[in-house]
Amino acid sequence: MSIVQISPKKKVVGKIVAPPSKSYAQRAIAIGGLAQNNIVIKQPGNSADVLAAIRVLEDLNATIFLEGGDVIVHREIDMESKDDIMINCGESGLSTRLFSAFSLLFDQTFEIRGEGSINDRTMTMIEEGLQQFGKKILSNDGKLPLKISGKAKADKVVIDGSVSSQFVTGILLVAPFLAFDTTIQILNLKSRPYISMTLDIMRKFGLEFKLIGPDTYFIEGNQEIYKPVEYIVEGDWSSASFFAVAGAIGGSMTLTGLKKFSKQADLKIIEVIEKAGATVLWDKEDVEIQRNSLNPFEFDATDCPDLFPPIVVLASFASGVSRIKGVHRLIHKESNRAIALQKECAKVGVKIVVEGDELLVYGGNVVVGENVVFDSHNDHRIAMAMSLYAIGAKHAFTIQEAEAVNKSFPDFYTYFEYI
């Protein structure tokens, strides 16, 4: 377990280049493993989740080169293999659920393993979805490891999107490469922006689909990607959100490398900080966030639950009660983030109450006393969020299990130290 000490900051001012989106990078790596020609993925980053996706393709006998920070998929996965398959997705929820759909390409036993907190997260949506394709699944009471077997065949499947959109993403990405056509109907979709990301990247790689009804897609099978593709991974709004909040509560931050009209759900951070009274100035695709007033706000984070940690910290600096909707989306994350945020924010005097599907944050009373020790709960976004309490603090504090940030943003503490 690593411990990091965070020093107080009277104010923040600076400019950072946003790290690459691990969500887009993992999707691109997965498609690269299904292409028939070289796929170059430019600057996907070195987060643990991206490295996990690369290792999965290697487990599937794809040929991958790492060159100057780029990932080159030289040869697609070996779908002719007769041996049983085992992949390890590390702690990555997206890779676990996305690559489970790859089992539809194989008749032999396909085993999925993971590490750390992912072993405690539900995989029932995978079981129920793959069974509709005729697959048999053995699981650990709905959790990893999963052993998947049987020949895939289906005309239409109905996938529950209420818990996670990640398995839906996997089915959408794999369906063009199946030997049959598939109609995919998604019920109770809660993370619509993430599906928009998936469809966006499918278009960029030339994969075809048709929207034939509400959240219902027809995807023709036996599609191929024969032309070489060079894909540039855009900046990550999820990681950038912590620095956007830093600017809103502590001075001024300029973020570069981001798309103003991105499909990413966490672009909504701009809307939140404007609600809280910060000034937002765009210059092409650079955005400057300046502290102005700090007002309590109301925001529905159902479609962007990864924003809960940074915006809870934002709310804690605003005098008054902020309401953030979408608490039910926090249960199946790296930690139960509602409980983690309640526990950790209380250490600096911030009261958080869960009221139905809302978090009520009682702001304006942040006090970082001596010898405060935050626990990341092995959750990268909790670790990054707690770091923000250094702004305006009188005392340094420590974060336990600080290495959790490696999952998405290995260089976070280096970035944060110099703003």
Image (tube, rainbow, N blue to C red):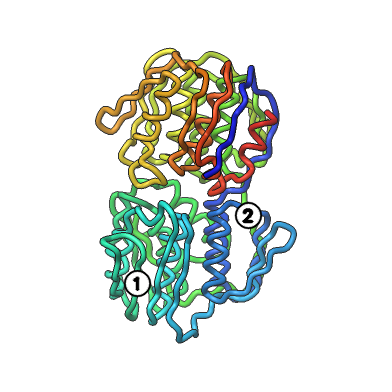
> Of residues 7 and 78, which is closer to you in this image?
7
Q: Considering the numbered disc 2 on the image, is that residue within a helix, a strand or a loop?
A: loop
**Left or right: 89 as drawn, with respect to 280:** left
Check disc 2 and report the residue beneath it. Answer: 44
* Amino acid on which the number 1 mark rests in the picture: Lys
Q: Position of residue 410 (x, y in %)?
A: 61, 46
**Left or right: 107 as drawn, with respect to 4:** left
Q: Position of residue 67 (x, y in %)?
A: 73, 63
Q: Position of residue 71 (x, y in %)?
A: 66, 62
**Left or right: 190 as drawn, with respect to 295:** left
Label 2: few (<14), some (14–19) or many (≥20) C-alpha neighbours in 10 Å: many
Q: Residue at x 35, y 62 (%)?
A: 144
Nearer to us of marks 1 and 2 is 1
Distance of mark 1 from mark 2, alpha carbons?
30 Å
Q: Residue at x 57, y 72 (%)?
A: 35
* Amino acid on which the number 2 mark rests in the picture: Pro
Q: Residue at x 64, y 31 (%)?
A: 287
Label 1: few (<14), some (14–19) or many (≥20) C-alpha neighbours in 10 Å: many
> Of residues 375 and 167, which is closer to you in this image?
375
Q: Earlier in the sequence, mark 1 or mark 2?
A: 2
Q: Position of residue 56 (x, y in %)?
A: 52, 67
Which corner quadrant of the image does residue 256 belong to? top right
Q: Considering the numbered disc 1 on the image, is that residue within a helix, a strand or a loop?
A: strand
Q: Residue at x 55, y 42 (%)?
A: 2
Query: Which image quarter is the C terminus in?
Result: top right
Check disc 1 and report the residue beneath it. Answer: 147
* 2 lies above or below 360: below
